[in-house]
Each structure stands twice: as structure tokens, then as C-alpha cells.
Image (cartoon, rainbow, N blue to C red):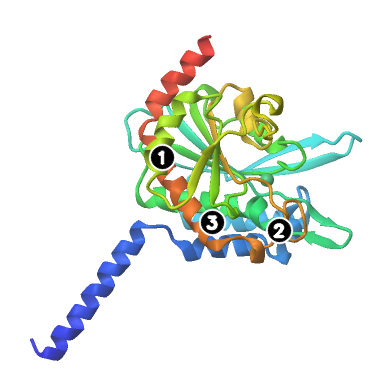
Amino acid sequence: MTTLTRLFSIVFFSLFALQAAAQERLNALQLLSDIKILSSDAFQGRKTGTNGSKKAQEYIIQRFLDYKLMFYGDGYEQPFSFETSNGTKINGTNLVGYIEGTSENKDNVLVVVAHYDHLGIKNNEIYNGADDNGSGVAGMFALAEHFVKKRPKHTIIFVAVDAEEIGLKGAKHFVNNPPVPQEKIALCINLDMISRNDKNELYACGTTHYPFLKPYLEKNSQKHDIRLKYGHDIPEEKSGGQQDWTFASDHGEFHRAGIPFIYFGVEDHKDYHQPTDRFETINQVFFIKATEMIIDQVVNLDENLPAIQVEKMKMKQK
Ligand SMILES: [Zn+2]
């Protein structure tokens, strides 16, 4: 081996090692690309029943196909409709894909939800909804990518939910018409607004309702350079003024059905439900760290899903 080829092979080997290490971790460029695209003007704020929503659906379907997610029935679409308070009929579409678990036990299923709808256009201004909730959908894709490479023990269903902003309509439809028997759903993980926080804090909401979930979250919370906080899940008058998020997003419909949930999200910020909730105003570093932590948490929750299902059944009997 000449010096030159030796040098060449060392460089080559290091490149491979780097690449292998990187593959174990989050695909951060993909994560940022997903949120940037979903919150671009082309999607017109992704309001339920609009052309912008249709475009978002096409993008999400393409991303599900990229990971070869399986589907129930003849496609990812789960259409539904509802009436607004003034009697207007609106059509919505959830997108549902799944990765089959490797375990013999097929009775415990984990559902990951992230709503893709937002507020659309008001007074000629596009509400791009980058944090709310391009971030959660992009985070859900990152989870799918992880579990496609490293299969989960239990089946994970991924739901890009529609019509959250108009009152959790898509989540309600999914919970009442699940593709597997409802009792098999052991846990719901909701991602809604995970891309920015000035205090470097991410909330895991729901442990007051389901205290048995907290030790699983604690196990991994210290490994990350971001603070995992609990709370926002008791009535405001009891918490000293902290908002109660129990029914603030899609996990609320799972909770109503007695399905335990963890909702990952941040506190409201100045751009919340404003046209300024754009790709430019998210915190990319926070978003990457939050998503890495969520992946770790879901890996651990998947491994412990049978015990979670037992606790869920115990609560239901009470
Ligand atoms: Zn939201």
C-alpha cells in the first residue's frame, strides 16, 4: 500500500464512520426541510377543506410513501365531514399510516398524532403555522424515519390529523373510527408546537391523569440538553393560573375515550396563531433537540407498552 492509498483509505474510513454515526441520530436537515415546506406560502395556511390543505395532504402522502408506511384499506386517507355551528358542511381528511411491530404481541398499539391543519388566510394574510403545527408533523416524520430503520416492538400508527383548529374534529373521527379495535390503543403521543421556547423547556403534559407514565419519561429526560417539564394538565384554579391543556389539542379526544396520552408541546409564544408563526421565527436548535428527545421517549414507551396497557385497563375498571 503506498502512502497515498493509505492516506486515501484512512480518509475514506473516517467518512464512513462519520456517516454511520450520523445515521444513528436524527436527520436534522430533513426535519428542517419538512417544516419549511409545510409552512411555506404555497400551502396557504393549510386550512381544512381548502386547496392549501389538499397540497399539504399530497406532501404528507409523499413523505409517508418515502418511508413505505403501510396503510389500512386502500390508502392513507381517512375522510370525514362535519358541520360548523352555522350549518356549513366541511370535509376533512386524516392521513393514517403505520409501521408493524416486531413483537409477537400484537395487542398493544401506539398512536402518534400531529395535526397538519392551520388557520389559512385571513384579511389577505397567510397564517403559515410553522410551529403550529408544521413542527409536529415534521417531528412525526422523524419518528417514522427512526422506526423504519429500527423497527418498533409494537405497531405504531401515525396520524396526520385534520381540523384540529376547528375543535379536534379529525382526532374525534379517528378515535371513534380507529383502524384497529379501540381497546388495543395503549397510548397516544401528540406532537403540537415543538419548535421554539425561550426557556429551553418542552412540556410532557398528561402525567397528572396518567401518573404511571412519568417514570418512563424521567428515565430519558436527563440525557438531553433541554428541560422536560410536567404540568398543564389540571384545572387552572387548582394550578395557580397555569393553563390546563387537557383538551387543548388532539390528545383530548383520546383522553375522553380513556386512552392514556402524552402531549409534547411548548407554552404559547408571541407568534402563536399569528401570521408571524413562520419558518423564520422557529428556533432550529431547540426544534432538533426537542425532536431527538421525543424519539428517545417514544422508543422507551414502545418497549414498555404492555405494562402501560395493563395500567390503562386498571384505570378503566375503576
Ligand atoms: Zn396546534
Amino acid at pointer 3: Phe
Q: What is the distance, in whole Å, between disc 1 and disc 2 at their CAs?
A: 35 Å
In-front residue for pair 300/33: 300
Q: CA distance from mark 3 to mark 2?
A: 14 Å
Of badges 3 and 1, nearer the viewer stands 3
Residue name at image x 43 percent, y 28 percent: 108
Residue 166 x %, y %:
77, 40
Residue at image location 30% in from the left, 62% down from the top: 21
Q: Which secondary structure lies at badge 1?
A: loop
Kindly identify which residue carries mark 2: 277
State the image quarter where residue 261 is shown.
top right
Q: Earlier in the sequence, mark 3 or mark 1?
A: 1
Checking the image for residue 100, the label placed there is 1
Question: 298 left or right of 21?
Answer: right
Residue at the front extreme, as displayed: 240
Amino acid type shown at disc 1: Glu
Give the image quarter of residue 263.
top right
Q: Which label sits in the foreground, 1 or 2?
A: 2
Q: Residues within 10 Å of mark 2 (few under 14, many from 20)?
A: many
Whole-percent x, y for residue 171 in the image: 65, 35
Q: Measured along the vertical axis of the image, is residue 89 above or below residue 234?
A: below
Extreme-right residue of the structure: 86
- Residue at the spot 91% in from the left edge and 35% down from the top edge: 86
Q: Is residue 88 above or below residue 19?
A: above
- As drawn, the label of residue 287 is 3
